Every structure is written in C-alpha cells, then in structure tokens.
C-alpha cells in the first residue's frame, strides 16, 4: 500500500468515526433499555394507596372549604349576589346577551380582566387583546370554560374561580402565584358554532 494523501486519509477517518458513533449509539440504547426495568418501583398495594390517598383527600377538602369561605366573604363585601356551581365556581352574569349559551365545540371570543382577590391585575384584554378559544377543547382554566357555558353573546360576567378550577397548586409559573383564587371580569364578544 502506498501512502494516502490528506483527502483520502480524512475520508477514511470520517468513515471510521461514523462507524464508531453508530456502534456506540446502539450500545447506549441497548444499555438504557435493559437498565430501565431494574430501577422500576414495585406497584403499590391497595393498602398503600389508601394510606396516602385518604389524608390527601382530607387536606384537599379542607383547602377547598377555606377557599370557599374566602370567596363568599369577598363577594359579600362587594354586595355581589353570586351563584355557586356544583364544582365550586362562583359566578354573577349580567344577562343582556342574545342567542343561546356557548356549548362544547363553539369558538368564543371574550374581553376580560383577570386579577387576584387582592386586586393585582394579572392579564387583560387591554394588554393582550381579546381571547378566543374552543369551548371544551382548549387549554384555559376549567372554571373559565365552565363560566362561558353559562353566557350568551353580549353577556357580561364576574367569575371567581378557586384554585382547583384555575391554576391549582403551582399557579401559572408567571403572574398567578400558587394556590390563587382568581377573579375574571369578562364580556362575551362572540360565539361561533361549527
């Protein structure tokens, strides 16, 4: 064999490097797939699940109860005659709208102000523009989704949404803190059925 020029040497080096990379990748995948089962935690027994579930359910009931009292007192101080849904959404609708209420699959457009109970404005149509979403199919607060189903085009509403129907234990990781009750003043601008 004669001596290789630089170009041939480089091409041979690349070919060998690719081969080594493919072999190492395959070995890594094989190792990862075989190790996966070694560290799997055994499935908890019914007794173990019950042991942890019951205290968590009780804590959740207590938190929901405290949130409900805060919301009731807040509405009472403002003389708002709010209704409470079965899920815990508090709402007050000024029914001056027309047509049918929004239903699952409708595209709704709302103007809104979303604030905390201490008055801190978090989000607003003024800064973000009107919001449109498909009822029952979008990533909005479940309390908001429930509230718009009670509204017709042109209606205005106040929704007080407890954490379990809003952003829960974590908040929204931006302007809404963990476990926050939120107040949404909204107007139903449009409802489109498909």
Image (tube, helix red, strand yellow):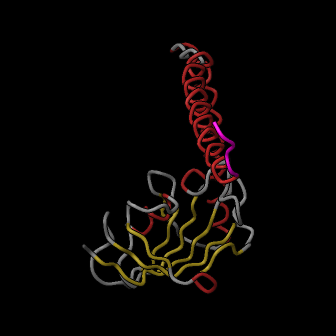
* Position in image of residue 140 (x %, y %): 50, 63
Name the side, left or right, on which 93 lies relative to 171. left
Residue at 55 percent across and 84 percent down: it is 129
Q: Is residue 63 shown above or below 6? A: above
Q: Quadrant of residue 7?
A: bottom right
Foreground: 3 or 184?
Answer: 3
Magenta span: predominant SS is loop
Q: Is residue 38 shown above or below 91? A: above
Foreground: 21 or 4?
Answer: 4
Q: Is residue 13 shown above or below 89? A: above
* Position in image of residue 83 (x %, y %): 48, 63
For the image, the number of numbered tags is: 0
Q: Is residue 34 magenta?
A: no
Residue at 71 percent across and 53 percent down: it is 178
Residue at 63 percent across and 66 percent down: it is 76
Q: Quadrant of residue 51?
A: top right
Residue at 65 percent across and 59 percent down: it is 172
* Position in image of residue 159 (x %, y %): 53, 68
Foreground: 96 or 129?
Answer: 129
| Image quadrant where one finds the N terminus | top right
Name the side, left or right, on which 129 lies relative to 73. left
Name the side, left or right, on which 70 lies relative to 146. right
Q: Which residues are magenta?
A: 1-5
* Position in image of residue 56 (x %, y %): 62, 31
Q: Is residue 97 shown above or below 66? A: below
């Amino acid at each position: 064999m004669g001596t290789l020029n630089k170009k041939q040497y480089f091409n041979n080096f690349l070919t060998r490097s690719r081969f080594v990379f493919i072999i190492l990748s395959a070995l890594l995948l094989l190792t990862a797939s075989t190790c996966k089962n070694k560290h799997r935690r055994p499935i908890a027994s019914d007794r173990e699940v019950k042991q942890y579930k019951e205290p968590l359910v009780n804590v959740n009931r207590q938190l929901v109860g405290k949130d409900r009292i805060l919301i009731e007192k807040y509405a009472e101080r403002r003389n708002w005659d709010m209704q409470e849904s079965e899920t815990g959404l508090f709402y007050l609708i000024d029914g001056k709208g027309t047509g049918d209420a929004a239903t699952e699959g409708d595209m709704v457009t709302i103007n809104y102000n979303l604030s905390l109970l201490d008055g801190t404005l978090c989000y607003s149509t003024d800064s973000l523009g009107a919001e449109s979403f498909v009822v029952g199919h979008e990533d909005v607060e479940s309390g908001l989704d429930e509230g718009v189903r009670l509204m017709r085009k042109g209606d205005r509403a106040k929704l007080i949404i407890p954490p379990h129907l809003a952003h829960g234990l974590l908040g929204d990781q931006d302007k809404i803190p963990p476990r926050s009750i939120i107040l949404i003043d909204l107007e139903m601008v449009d409802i489109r059925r498909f």
